[in-house]
Image: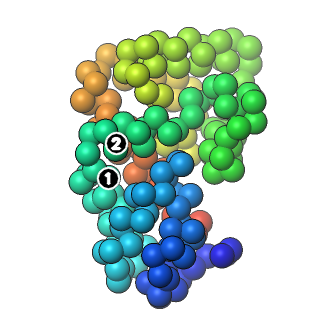
Amino acid sequence: MSGVLSIAEVNALDAPAFAAALGFLFEHSPWVVERAWTARPFADRAGLHAAMVAVLEAATENERLALIRAHPELAGKAAIAGDLTAASLSEQASAGLDRLTADEFARFHALNAAYGARFGFPFIICVRLNDKTSILAAMERRLANDEAAEVAEAIHQIGLIAGLRLEGAVAP
């Protein structure tokens, strides 16, 4: 299925078609979308997004950590190797992460390493709402958080990312 779907079209999809159409919203984690299907019918795109966020909130700690770990590092190995999903590639490019200077790349690499060592998962931020300067500042600032605060912030950021991805897939 391609193009922007109306909410009526979304509501008419069976579970497999719903997952196929919207499974890309959460990085390598279609289970979020699959579970949200049971909340149909959705009044609008905002209601659909709210149902998906509710799935995140109801998820177990292990499921949340798996979702967070499914995301690539920003300007990391997957980006260099060309192994990002189309959505991640576009989003990282929108923040200029595909055009880093050698110093910026070294700073991202060091902060990714420090963050990963501290928390055991990649730093998550909605890059489409930021630029490389604000992302680096957030990485430095959030290194001081405890793990519970970072898990909560990562899940919040994933909700923002999915909401922006949803705007391109479903009409308001």
Against 126, residue 31 (above or below) is: below
Report, in whole angstroms, how far the alpha carbon at label 1 lies from the one at label 2: 7 Å
Q: In the figure, is residue 22 to the left or right of 102? A: left
Where is residue 19 shown, x and y percent of the image? Answer: 51, 68
Could you tell which of marks 1 and 2 lies nearer the N-terminus?
1
Residue named by callout 2: 64
Q: Position of residue 100 (x, y in %)?
A: 72, 24
Callout 2 environment at 10 Å: few (<14), some (14 to 19), or many (20+)?
some
From the viewer's perspective, tell me whether residue 144 is left or right of residue 92.
Answer: left
Helix, strand or loop at disc 2?
helix
SS class, disc 1: helix
- Is residue 18 or residue 43 the one in the foreground? 18
Q: Quadrant of residue 39?
A: bottom left
Question: Could you tell me if the residues under marks 1 and 2 are in contact, i.e. CB atoms within 8 Å?
Answer: yes
- Residue 132 is situated, as x and y percent measured from the top left of the image, at 59, 29
Q: Is residue 82 visible?
A: yes
Nearer the observer, 9 or 102: 9
**Colouring used for the render:** rainbow
Residue at x 45%, y 76% (from the top left corner): 15
Q: Residue at x 42, y 57 (%)?
A: 31
The amino acid type found where label 1 is placed reads Leu
Q: Label 1: how many residues lie within 10 Å, few (<14), some (14-19) or many (20+)? A: many
Kindly identify which residue carries mark 1: 56
Q: Which mark is residue 85?
A: none
Residue type at mark 2: give it: Arg
Q: Could you tell me residue 28's position as x and y percent?
A: 54, 48
